[in-house]
Amino acid sequence: MPRAFITGITGQDGQHLAEFLHGKGYDVFGMVKGQNNPRMTMMRDEFPFVEPVPGDLADLPSLVKALEYVQPDEVYNLGAISFVALSFNQAELTANITGLGVLRMLEAVRMVGGNTDNGIRFYQASSSEMFGKVRETPQTELTPFHPRSPYGCAKVFGHDIVVNYRESYDMYACSGILFNHEGPRRGYEFVTRKVTNAAARIKLGLQHELVMGPLDTKRDWGYAGDYVKAMWLMLQQDQPDDYVVSTGETHTVEELVELAFSTVGIEDWRSVVRQDPKFFRPSEVDLLIGDATKARTKLGWEPEVDFPTLVQMMVENDMKIESDKLRRG
Ligand code: NAP
C-alpha cells in the first residue's frame, strides 16, 4: 500500500485529504503538534485509520524523525498558520511556520530520500493570497505575486523555495496554488464559517447579530472535498509542476451573507448584520478569481460543488450542530 504523510492533519484540508487517500487504499500518517493537542480526540474518533506522528514545522529534527519512521511515498505539507488576520498580529510566527516550515519540510524530505527516481513526492499548499493586489484577472500560474499580508508573504517564500528545491535537487515537488475552499470542516475563525454559523445561531435565537468586516471583497470559493483531489492528482504525474486550483467564479462576501441567511429563511439579513472597522485588515485583497485551465487540461480536474450548494451544505451542517447543542442544553 502507498504511504502518505500529511502535515496539518487536524485542519480542514488534512481531514478531507486523509479521508480521500484512505479511500484510495493509502496508509495515512498525520503529523500532530504539541504534547496534548486538543484536536486529538476528534482525530481518534473520526479518523481511526490515521496514525498520528508527533512533530512540529518549527522543529527540523522532529520532521526528519517523522519521515524516517513513516517512510512515505508522498508528503502533503498542509500545516501552516493559515488565518490571514492572525498573521498581521503574529507575523514572525507566521513567517516561521508558514514560510520557513516549508524549507524545513523540504530539507527533511531531501535528507530522508526525495529525488525524482522513486523518492518521496512532495506537495506544498500554496495560496491565492500570494496574488494579493492582483496584477491581472483572472490569475494563472504565471501571474506575478503581490502579497498583502504576512501570511501571503510567507506563502510566497514557501512557493519559491519549492521551485528552488525542485530545480536544485531534482526533487518531485509541486505547489497547488489553491483559491479559497470551504466546507463543514472549515475553522470558525474564517469568514465563510463565521457567516454560516451565525446564520444558524441567529435563526435558533442563540445569537442576535453578526459583526463583519468589508462586504464588497470578492473571492473564488470552492469546496475543500473537490480541492484535495487536485493535490493528489499533482503527485501522480510524470513531471512535478505547479497548478492553480479554483472554480473560475467570484462572489462577494455580501452574496455569501445573503445566501446563508436566505437558507435559514431570513431574507432581511441587513437587520442583523453590522460592520465594524475592527474586522478590516491593514491591507486588503479586494478581488481573487483563478484560471484553473492547466489543472483542468493536464490533471483532468474539475470542481463538482458550486457556490450555492457549498453555502447550503455549510449552513445545514451548522444548523444541525447548533440544534444538537440546544437540545443537550
Ligand atoms: P487549517 O484548517 O487552518 O489547518 C492548519 C493546520 O496546520 C492545522 O492542522 C494546524 O494544527 C497545523 N499547524 C499549525 N501550526 C503548526 C506547526 N507549528 N507545526 C505543524 N502543524 C501546524 O488550514 P486548511 O484550511 O486546512 O489549509 C491547509 C493548508 O492550505 C494551509 O497551509 C493553508 O494555508 C493552505 N491554503 C488553504 C486555503 C483554504 O481556503 N482553506 C487556500 C489556500 C491555501 P493544529 O490543529 O495543531 O493547530
Image (cartoon, rainbow, N blue to C red):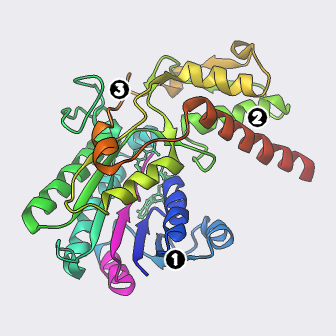
The answer to which of marks 3 and 2 sits earlier in the sequence is 2
* Mark seen at residue 200: 2
The residue positioned 59% from the left and 25% from the top of the image is 256
Q: Is residue 329 among the parts visible in the rendering?
A: no
Residue under circle 1?
52
Image mark for residue 21: none
Q: CA distance from mark 3 to mark 1?
A: 38 Å
Q: For the residue labelled by badge 3, is the local secondary structure a helix, a strand or a loop?
A: loop
What residue is shown at x 25% (from left), y 57% (from top)? Answer: 174
Q: Quadrant of residue 72?
A: bottom left
Question: Dot 3 corresponds to which residue?
Answer: 283
Magenta highlight range: 61-82
Instruction: Give the percent coordinates (x, y) of residue 125.
Output: 35, 53
Residue at 39% over, 43% down: 87
Q: Earlier in the sequence, mark 3 or mark 1?
A: 1
Label 3 to label 2, Cα distance in Å? 30 Å
Position of 72 relative to 293 (above/below): below
State the image coordinates of residue 78 (x, y, percent, origin top left): 40, 58
Q: SS class of the residue under badge 2?
A: helix
Quadrant (top left/top right/bottom left/bottom right) for the N terminus? bottom left
Q: Which amino acid type is shown beneath numbered disc 3?
A: Ser
As rendered, which of 127 and 22 lies closer to the eye? Answer: 22
Asked if marks 3 and 1 touch (Cβ < 8 Å), the reply is no
- x then y, percent, for residue 92: 32, 50
Which of the two residues, 104 or 305, is positioned nearer the viewer here? 305
Reply yes or no: does residue 102 show up in magenta.
no
- Magenta stretch encompasses residue 69: yes
